[in-house]
Image (cartoon, rainbow, N blue to C red):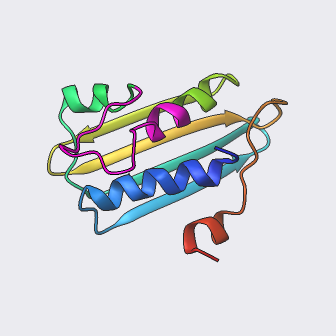
């Protein structure tokens, strides 16, 4: 993916497919701590511990029938954060939704650009 906004779009599509009616996205740019933090919270179907762990594996999909998607969204987002010294965390509970927190160092030369969040997420 070219930028963080495309990763975020993929995560939001996952939330919608999981039945989320409310999705909260926070982007926190903390120059003093040299961190860009992205938090996505949804009220979708949530995942049990096994599914939560598997969701971070490449090519895993919870869909019984694959349609054009290969299940790389979460693993690639995680990889792109960790490769530059950031972190990726997911917490979920069946029936209560999922929270994803991704941290990137602001000054790492290989950090992906944030991209145009508005146009990417609103189809502008």
Locate the N terminus and report the quarter of the image it occupies. Answer: top right
Residue 61 among those drawn in magenta? yes
Residue name at image x 54 percent, y 38 percent: 102
The image quadrant where one finds the C terminus is: bottom right
Residue lying at 27% horizontally and 40% vertically, measured from the top left: 92
Q: Position of residue 54 (x, y in %)?
A: 29, 26
Residue found at the very far left of the displayed protein? 95
Front residue of 19 and 29: 19
Position of residue 39 relative to residue 107, above or below, is below
The residue lying at 61 percent from left, 31 percent from top is 81
- Decide if residue 29 is on the left or right side of residue 6: right
How many numbered marks are there?
A: 0
Magenta-drawn stretch, dominant element (helix, strand or loop) = loop
Q: Position of residue 67 (x, y in %)?
A: 32, 51
The answer to which image quadrant residue 105 occupies is: top right
Asked whether, in this view, residue 74 is left or right of residue 21, the answer is right
Image coordinates of residue 111 in percent, x first then y, are 75, 35
Identify which residue is drawn at 60% across, 53% down.
6
Q: Position of residue 5 (x, y in %)?
A: 62, 54
Whether residue 49 is in magenta: the answer is no
Residue 19 in the image: above or below residue 37: below
Is residue 30 or residue 119 the one in the foreground? 119
Camera-nearest residue between 101 and 62 = 62
Q: Which residues are magenta?
A: 58-77
Res 117 quadrant in image: bottom right
Q: Left or right: 4 with respect to 109? A: left
Residue 91, quarter of picture: top left
């Amino acid at each position: 993916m070219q930028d963080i906004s495309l990763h975020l779009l993929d995560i939001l599509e996952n939330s919608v497919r999981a039945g989320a009616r409310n999705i909260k996205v926070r982007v926190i740019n903390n120059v003093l701590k040299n961190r860009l933090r992205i938090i996505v919270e949804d009220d979708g179907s949530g995942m049990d511990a096994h599914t939560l762990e598997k969701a971070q594996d490449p090519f895993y999909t919870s869909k019984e029938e694959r349609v054009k998607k290969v299940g790389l969204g979460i693993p690639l987002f995680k990889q792109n954060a960790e490769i530059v010294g950031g972190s990726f965390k997911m917490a979920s509970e069946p029936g209560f939704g999922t929270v994803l927190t991704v941290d990137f160092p602001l000054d790492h030369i290989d950090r992906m650009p944030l991209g145009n969040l508005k146009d990417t997420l609103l189809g502008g």
